[in-house]
Amino acid sequence: MSESRRNESGKIKLILLLFIVGIAAFFLWREISAAPPEIRLGREIKGISRSTELSFTATDRRSLLALSFSIEQGGETIPILSETYGSRWRFWEPGPKELTRQVRLGVAHQEQLRDGAAELRIEVQNKNWFSSRATLTRDVVVRSVPPRIDILSGLLHVNQAGSEMVHYRVSRHTVSSGVRVGEYFFPGYPAPGGDRDERLALFAFPYGVPADTVPQVVARDDAENESSASFPFRLLTKNFRSRELQISDRFLQATVPSILSHTPELTDQGDLLKNYLMVNGQLRESNRAKIAELSKQTAAEFLWQGSFLQLMNSAVESQFADARSYWYQGKQVDQQVHLGFDLAAVRNTPVEASNAGRVVFAEYLGIFGNTIILDHGFGLQSLYAHLHSFDVGVGDTVRRGQTIGKTGSTGLAGGDHLHFTMLLAGVEVNPIEWWDQRWIEQHILPKMPAGQVMR
């Protein structure tokens, strides 16, 4: 072979070798620089109860090789889950790229666990040549015993659609508590002047809740254990009125278009009656959901003192929980329950704050029109609707009897009046009790810790 051919062959071999080295270097670089697997918890967890479910997801862009889940406590490792998916060397048999697992934790499933601190550890390995790993840990507390609840109140007499307050004590490590009445929950708060574990919860027996429903105090600890306790309770049932309301075209034209103009999220149905039914039903529920959300903006202290004020010199047009049937052109077209008082006085009557509190809402609110909501603490709030104007804004602190606005006919109102109601955790309750100083002295003040009075 000539010298030139040998040189040419050598060059080809060198190029081929460099190509092979380049390919190998590329794959090596890809393996070295590959991201490690990822681990995501289905939810964050701070504690393990007697039985806690937890899910997690592991992912890798190539494939997973193995995973393990364990709990470390007191120097001991408690295995929970261990899986492998083939061999790292059999690259032609790839493992899963993503998987989700659910585990059950707690002394009901791992007898070795003891109450106290522990660490969750999840480890995932992929099929990378260099076996990239990912580890996720969480410090948790193990609690096998649910919170204790001691009821400190005596027999409670509760009016249907009315309010009450229960005094109770919870054990340490309780993070939330309150009263559950059917599907409703009313949070409890530290009792002013009480010991660190005493709680007070204002609650309602809402209109529409079956009379055989049994209210219970419930408590949850930092490991998500939940316990409940009944308390002495007697429900005083009430008869509520039924009314028929005639709807005129004049009323529809005066109210519905204005409400739609303030509520762009609603779609015009192209018919005045259909729009009214949408407002009276769908928008009403949306407005109640907004009110419930605002209930979270409450102070963990009593901001009020004494009985609440009724609109001065006002006449009652509609009472609490009037069941209304709406008639249009001789046909019944809708039914709703009016959960408030309609109070009428002269046009543009000054509206006074029923008690001391803080403004959490002051703007247009669908069927309620211009609306103010005052927070009085412990989930108790008062609502003033259909206002003509505002004299206060969100964040303002108001005193009992201070003018906050003027009556009007905004929203779904047929004339100038004030729609007023009291709210507990966003649930409408009968204001009559809160207007009555004697009721407050009998139902609220006796449950305050010894020596404590509301400011």
Image (cartoon, helix red, strand yellow):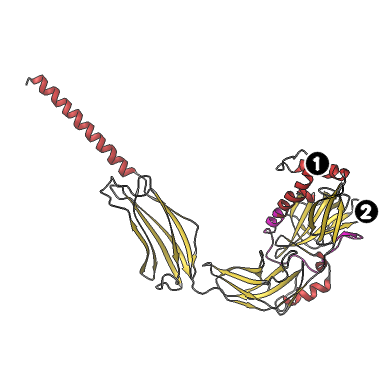
Residue extent of the magenta highlight? 289-318
* Residue 294: in magenta span: yes
Q: Is residue 344 above or below residue 166?
A: above
Q: What secondary structure is found at the residue carrying circle 2?
A: loop
| Quadrant of residue 325 within the rendered picture | bottom right
Q: CA distance from mark 1 to mark 2?
A: 30 Å
Q: Which residue is mark 2?
A: 346
Name which residue type carries label 1: Leu
Whether residue 368 is visible, yes or no, is yes
Name which residue type carries label 2: Val
Q: Which residue is mark 1?
A: 272
Residue at x 16% of width, y 25% of height: 11
Instruction: Point out residue 88 in the picture as x, y percentages from the top left corner.
Output: 28, 50
Residue at x 42% of width, y 59% of height: 137
Instruction: Point out residue 367 in the picture as x, y percentages from the top left corner.
Output: 78, 50
Which residue is farthest front?
Answer: 331
Q: Nearer the viewer, residue 438 or 228?
A: 228
